[in-house]
Amino acid sequence: MIEVLGLTKLYGEFLAVSELSFAVRPGEVLGLVGPNGAGKTTTLRCLAGIIPPTRGTITVSGDDLATRPIEAKRRIAFFPDEPRLFDYLTVGQHLNFVARIYGVPDYEARGRELLAEMELAEKRDALPAELSRGMKQKLALACGLLHAPSVIYFDEPLTGLDPYGIRRMKDSILRRARDGAAIIISSHLLHLVEEICSHLLILQNGKKVADGTLAEITQRFSQHPETSLEEVFFRATSGPAPAPPPLDPPAAPPASPP
Amino acid sequence: MISALLYLQSRSALNRFRTRLKRLKQPKYLIAALAGGAYFWFFMLRFWLMPGKPRPEAALAGVQVFQMPVDLLQGIGATILFVIVLAAWVFPHERAALIFTEAEVAFLFPAPLNRRGLIHYKLARSQFAILFTTLLLTLFSGRWRAGPTQAFIAIFGWWLILATLSLHFLGSSFTRTLLLERGISNWLRRGLVLGVAGGIVTAIVLWARRTMPGLDLAEVNGIKGFTEYLNTALASGPAPYLLLPFRVALKPFLATDFSQFLLALGPALLLLALHYFWVIRSNVAFEEASVTASEKVAALLTAARAGKGAHLKPMKRKRDPFRLAPTGFPPLALLWKNLIAAGQLFSTRIWMVVLVQVVVMGIAMTSIGRGEHQAWPAVVGGLLIGLLAMSFVIGPNFARVDLRQDLLVADLLKAYPLRGWQVILGELLAPVAILTALQVVLVVAIVLIFTPEPKHFPLATRFACGLGVVLLAPALNCAGLLIPNAAAVLLPGWMPRGKDRPQGIEATGQAMIMLFGQLFVLLIGLLPAAGAGAGVFFLGKLLLPWPVVVPFAALLAALVLAAEAALGVWLLGKFFERMDVSAELGQ
């Protein structure tokens, strides 16, 4: 369960996030969308305890991230868009290291399970330099899920994944939600958001534009429930969607013989 | 097309300069630039630019070398050039590759440019480096002081030498590639080149032996006699023929007046032109090798900018330094991780090199001991004591497997459920362990070897002092390492990392400020510990023999220092918790 109240982040005089309040309950998947520079990544980093908010409170399963950071962080997993790994630790050593940091007594069994799920079992002794981009992402995912987090943040989770990887990532996210995790996904891929998110939070210039279930938000910006999320997004952030490019004019019929 | 490439070069240089100038608005760069500028001015430039100022011998050496006869200088210079050129034909093994930046590869290789265009661009770009080196060498040699004509001759002369050499390197790399394509392997080429060069050199030596009186070092009349012999050997017989092209390249630089310079200029320019046509006419496919080489250089630069050291050696899997249980004190996980990282630095080859050096040093010292000087243990012991002292002062700057290394993943560390002090302590443990282990080995060696006055310094006394140092070492290392790590947390912008790292004068200034700051803070921090240790020592000495008191005094000093370090770790942890990695590190 994530509760955010009045989250504000300033960089000098620049307002990155302004008075943001929302909540994500267990089993919910919140899509955090907005144009570039809307404050999505800053929000996620504040929620993960990586950067301190200027104002506001963030509570993770009842623990305030400012006053009880250790208890709160034990429940969190944050996956940045670029997998962050140690160049000199093998796949197995990564899991061992993370297990000690989070105190996971049964890490060997869980690690084996996760590596099998991520199809990395054969790569246990490989260094990150020997892994492809997708495999690195899977390793980061295995490390993040090792301590069975109940709150998970994804920043652009599909970056660099092949179609198989995309499918697996979506399945993995949905499975964790079904198991009761509260999940936030920041992404520009609106079809991903539409496919796997139960809730939506639209940000623009650091401010909340809309917040609610997909149906609620669609209803707010359009009369038709079938309106695509893309159309809703454009209406919410910049008025109507740009007109589609004109189609090529149909070829003239061949001149009929006299 | 050439104009577009020149535009790219000139704008890039100008923008780079502007960026560095703009950066001086930030106090951290301005202060560093001022400190670096002051260092260069007081220790180097003022001796060269202000003739009235007394100059150290090192600065004068560049001028004095030109007091030799011009013929001899020509001979020596030509021989040096010969060796450089020979090396260019013998040592390299890779195919011809022009190094471009990643952006140049991306923009220029797919562009409608032929190979010649790329070579011309590369030659034009290399001129910036050549001109800079030319100015620097002219400044160093101090020859510009002899008037504008000499300055002009020096600048143009250096340029001719460097430009010709640069073209020769490029041309030789193209020819090497052509030879490879025609089935002549690197080893065959090396054999041929060395065979021909060896034959010529043998002919010169044989000629010198037959026609010149033998060189008896005992009878040579000082350096003058030796130079005369050398001059004759280089200026007569077959040597002048071998060295002719090299002398041609050197002559304009060594001209004593303008008319001599003009006379020498024609042949030198002809040599340069021949090299140019050689390079331009070589039809060698260098693109693929260039892309690979450029990628390597880019990776090298990225690694260096990221503070990972400029090496491209692939990492190897390292065994766990100890079994890390999944539960327990979390900072040990950071120790475990950093010891694995440190293992990357200690390869078998490095250990072999160290072992060979130790053995060679040992044999050398033993042979001294067998001669008149029987005091080799004192010499070796003295050396080891110096090394031990240095390990405490500059060791923390070398053992960087701590927060300085992990600053790049500070966001990851901040996401872990760890208190700030746990992160700082965990990061400090590995370098403390490494330095302490090294120091214990040194102490053991010193205790066993160092025997200057056996009567006053028996083994028991040496053991007591050694024990004192060993007791003090972990706390002292921890205190020493806290300072650069505090700089990483409090002044992360000053740590060399990322593209924004300072370069040139600013980097020198920054390194100096950091070193002096570190020493100052360490000395201040040592005062209470030294006071406590000294108190115990002087009081204890009244009751017990001083060697017995030393370990107790060291233990108390270590406890005081450990308490200070613990306070430092806790405080630094608080700062780490408040550190905004987005604002400070741009992560």
Image (tube, coloured by chain):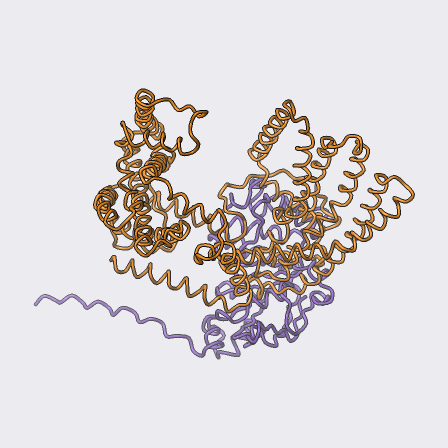
Chain A drawn colour = purple
Q: Nearer the viewer, residue B90 or A97?
A: B90
Quarter in which the C terminus of chain A is drawn:
bottom left
Q: Nearer the viewer, residue B201 or B87?
A: B201
* B222 on left or right of B316: left
Q: Residue furthest left?
A: A258
Quarter in which the N terminus of chain A is drawn:
bottom right
- Residue A115 location in percent, x, y? 60, 45
| Residue at (57, 51) in percent of width and height | A85
Q: Compared to B304, does A189 lie above or below?
A: below
- Residue B301 location in percent, x, y? 46, 51
Q: Compared to B132, does A33 lie above or below?
A: below
* B16 on left or right of B70: right
* B499 on left or right of B426: left
- Residue A204 location in percent, x, y? 52, 75
Can see residue B501?
Answer: no
Q: Residue furthest right?
A: B543
| Residue at (12, 67) in percent of width and height | A256
- Residue A82 location in percent, x, y? 53, 56
Q: How many marks?
A: 0
Q: Nearer the viewer, residue B103 or A35?
A: B103
Q: Quadrant location of residue B511?
A: bottom right
Can see residue B362?
Answer: yes
Chain B drawn colour = orange
| Residue at (32, 31) in percent of width and height | B234
| Residue at (74, 45) in percent of width and height | B473
Q: Nearer the viewer, residue B11 or A213?
A: B11
